[in-house]
Image: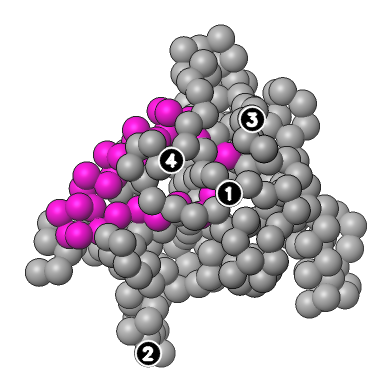
């Protein structure tokens, strides 16, 4: 069997998530040992990836995003957990492929304040005010608002990724990375098996999203319910979704080489 023992995870439904709203009210353990972990390049842990925002072949944008960096960096604790996921995937000749991890605030601001609001308005000119902001923040967190409320990707604990055949093509997940619509919701394909129009494409996407979800959850990550690719370890969203008393990671700075 192609997926071997991993097939059981492809067959296991994704459960309803806890609400992620209000996660920035969760306290942060600033003095905890985890928060002293450095940001390191994913490649140092044997993790594959390419920064999506620094590569102009990045649909639907097709341009290098202002402020993006070439490197993929994340907290050491998160990186070690991704290594453990790769250990399981290796049995089926699969591996993780990272799109983004720690993210400069310039990138967060660009999408939250400029690109996505403009795109949503283009599609629905009636969207404005609080309704527009709510739709934006379904997919793009507000930029960091002080040390007690960092955006998830600024902590180094949030990571955007998929699964691919080792060194090859990604598994089919049913949507583009960064698709800001309901098709991006992690459990979008759950419950549709009885639909007469349910396709082979949808079945494959459902199975692969399940595989990614369970492998990441078992490694200690929490899944962002509105983005199949986004997982958190140690940040405030992780604490909210897992019921932890406090987040492990505050915002972090990474010195980009000139």
Which residue is label 2 attached to? 196
Image-quadrant location for residue 55: bottom right
Between the residue at mark 3 and the residue at mark 4, the CA separation in whole angstroms equals 15 Å
Between the residue at mark 2 and the residue at mark 1, the CA separation in whole angstroms equals 44 Å
Q: Nearer the viewer, mark 4 or mark 2?
A: 4
Residue at 70% x, 66% y is 63
At label 3, counting other C-alpha atoms closer than 10 Å, the crowd grade (few under 14, some 14-19, many 20 or more) is: few
Q: Pointers 4 and 1 in contact (CB under 8 A)?
A: no
Q: Nearer the viewer, mark 3 or mark 4?
A: 3
Residue at 48% x, 58% y is 228
Q: Is 65 placed above or below 202 here?
A: above
**SS category of the residue bearing label 3:** loop
- The quarter of the image holding the N terminus is bottom left
Which residue is label 1 attached to? 70
Between the residue at mark 3 and the residue at mark 2, the CA separation in whole angstroms equals 53 Å
Residue interval drawn in magenta: 74-102
**SS category of the residue bearing label 4:** helix
Q: Is residue 102 visible?
A: yes
- 179 vs 215, left or right, is right
The mark nearer the N terminus, 4 or 2, is: 4
Which residue is label 3 attached to? 255
Which residue is label 4 attached to? 42
Residue 179, given in percent of the width and then of the height, sits at: 60, 67
């Amino acid at each position: 069997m192609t997926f071997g023992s991993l097939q059981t995870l492809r067959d296991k439904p994704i459960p309803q998530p806890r609400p992620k709203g209000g996660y920035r009210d969760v306290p942060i353990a600033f003095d905890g040992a985890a928060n002293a972990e450095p940001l390191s390049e994913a490649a140092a842990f044997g993790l594959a990836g390419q920064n999506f925002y620094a590569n102009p072949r990045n649909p639907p944008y097709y341009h290098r995003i202002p402020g993006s960096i070439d490197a993929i960096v994340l907290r050491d604790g998160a990186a070690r957990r991704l290594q453990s996921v790769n250990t399981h995937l290796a049995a089926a000749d699969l591996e993780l492929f990272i799109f983004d991890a720690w993210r400069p605030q310039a990138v967060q601001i660009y999408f939250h304040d400029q690109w996505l609001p403009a795109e949503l308005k283009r599609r629905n000119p009636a969207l404005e005010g609080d309704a527009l902001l709510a739709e934006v923040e379904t997919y793009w967190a507000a930029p960091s608002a002080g040390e007690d409320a960092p955006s998830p990707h600024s902590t180094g604990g949030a990571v955007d990724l998929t699964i691919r055949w080792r060194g090859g093509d990604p598994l089919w997940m049913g949507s583009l990375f960064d698709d800001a619509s309901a098709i991006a919701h992690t459990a979008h394909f759950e419950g549709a098996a009885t639909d007469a129009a349910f396709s082979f494409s949808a079945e494959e996407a459902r199975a692969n999203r399940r595989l990614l979800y369970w492998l990441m959850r078992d490694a200690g990550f929490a899944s962002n319910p509105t983005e199949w690719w986004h997982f958190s370890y140690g940040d405030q969203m992780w604490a909210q979704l897992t019921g932890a008393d406090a987040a492990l990671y505050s915002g972090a700075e990474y010195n980009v080489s000139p």
